[in-house]
Image (cartoon, rainbow, N blue to C red):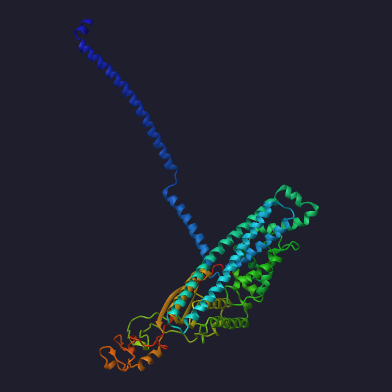
Amino acid sequence: MNKFIKKNVFLVGVLAIAAVGILLLLVMAAMKFLEMNEHRKATDDMRNRFAMLNRSQVPPFVKNIALVQKDAEGFTNRAENLKIYFGRVKEPALAIFVYDMNKQALDELAKAFEVFDKSDEFAKQREAVDAAHKKFSNSIIEFDKKSVILHKLEKELKVLESNEDTQEGKLRAVQEQSRKIADCRKELDELRTAIAGNFADAQAKRESFAAYINNCCNNENMRKLMQAADKQEDAKIVEFYRNICMQNVTPEMMKSVFRDFWQQEKEMLGPREQTYRRFVNERGATPERPANDPSKPVLWDTKLWENAIEIFTREIQKVTPEEVDSRNREEIFLSSLGLPRNLGQSASRLEAHSRKMADVIKNILDAGNVFNAGVGYGQKTLPQLKDNKGFVDVGDKGAGSQTTGQTGSAGENAQTGALLTANPADVIRHWEIVGDIAKRMVNANIDSLIDLSYINLAGDSSNENYKKFSYIITVVSREVEIREFLKQLNDSYKDHRIYVVKRFELKKQEDQIQIIIDKAQGVLDNRANNTDGNRNTGSGNMDDVSDAGKTVDDGTVFVEKGAYPECVAGRSTFCRATIVVDYIEFSKDVIN
């Protein structure tokens, strides 16, 4: 063996090195195999984890269902908030009424609780409530003042536009006045937003203060102090108003309470005034007089109700042309809770109401210098749309187009008949809508009201949640004023009303005086002998006058050139507009 090794040293060396290499490769392969096993195990663990996560996660379609449901809830809440704009004009007055009731109860609670709590925190909370309330009240006062200023500016604008001065000075004055009106309207929009914010802040401060007093009353040391023999009378007052404040009555809650009350009350068929008084006492009480039903929590102090109803009367007067006083405010208040007015189902009261409202609206228009002679606010059928079939151009003698149906009706502009035999709630609503439209005409400086008629007094109730009341309005005024009137209708949502303009027809008002002027100047008489469109009047101080290529009888207006004096008659800038509008009202919360 030794000889073999000695003779083959090189071969043995190579074999030895090969053996060591093989052994090393085997070790490295084993290490790599172990490492690969670890990675494979980790990969399997990750696969198992991913599979577990996939099994545990919400399937994509289930996720979408949750997101869609969330979006639907958001849209539902938004739609609920938007309902206030659809004819719920009494809602702001009701909200302020409820707010004032809660504020008065909190003031009484604070006055009584002051006997027990002399802390700085109590004084700080009370001061914050008073400051927020004052800020809210001042914003309402400022809004009312600014509204008066706007009305004054609009009246002044109409005076400027009718001024005999037709030179450049008049144009500048009108533009400056229009700018002031635009600025005033912008400030009113800002104040309207501020009122909403201040109202929310005042409510939040009130709720915070009521919660603070409630927590103090639940404190063991405070309870012992309130149970002292000489403090029991004060503690009784605190407990009474604390329970009212913690109910946190809202307009929707008051509506709901009234609905429950009406289910029993409607069987009695009594006057609405008695219904009103029984409702006040149903869930109201005083520290001296307990509630009618001890099983139901007291929601208000009946002694404080009268103060709040005065505020309600003041606020509701801003949104209705009808005079609100002690004779009708109780029925109006119930209507803000959803109960339609019925004027005691008296035909004589309904007739008197219609006549009075017609006079009120006439006074509104007269005060705004809107000519309105002969307007009766009666019923009229909706004319069918015109088409161009068989159209014949007859110039200034008529429209020339044929219509597909008759217009008007035998009973249009009648104050008697349908208005006096209809449902009283529909008649009252009709006059409220007419009054609001009249107010917007005055604000737009409309010159003349020719016709304002309803199509269906009871409205279109094809949608179970909303009603549509259609009106036909015909006015004569300048184009800019008609545009402003349309803008007034468009912006009515700010006053919780919605008008939708369905049709609009505008044409130049016929100008008979201009035809006389043209004939006197020879424009028409010399037309046949003037083929080139020019003529000479024969007067040394008058230049040429050119036609537009047709006679005035063909409906075109000739163009003046030169230094003619300005016409003091004719050249009318007035237009006649016929507008069909739908007034949309949310009716689902109306109690039947």
Q: Quadrant of residue 103?
A: bottom right
Left or right of 21 on screen, residue 210: right
Specify the farthest residue to the left: 7
Residue 567 in view (yes/no): yes
Specify the farthest residue to the top: 3
- Give whichever of 149, 469 is nearer the camera: 149
Is 392 situated above or below 176?
A: below
Left or right of 524 on screen, residue 191: right
Is 492 situated above or below 401?
A: above
The image shows residue 287 at horizontal and vertical percentages of 74, 61
Q: Quadrant of residue 262?
A: bottom right
Left or right of 588 on screen, residue 257: right
- Give whichever of 432, 167 is nearer the camera: 167
- Give whichever of 387, 261 is nearer the camera: 387
Residue 450 in view (yes/no): no
The image shows residue 28 at horizontal and vertical percentages of 32, 23
The image shows residue 67 at horizontal and vertical percentages of 46, 53
The image shows residue 11 at horizontal and vertical percentages of 20, 13
| Quadrant housing the N terminus | top left
- Give whichever of 239, 99 is nearer the camera: 99
> Residue at coordinates 23% horizontally, 5% vertically from top-left?
2
| Quadrant housing the C terminus | bottom right
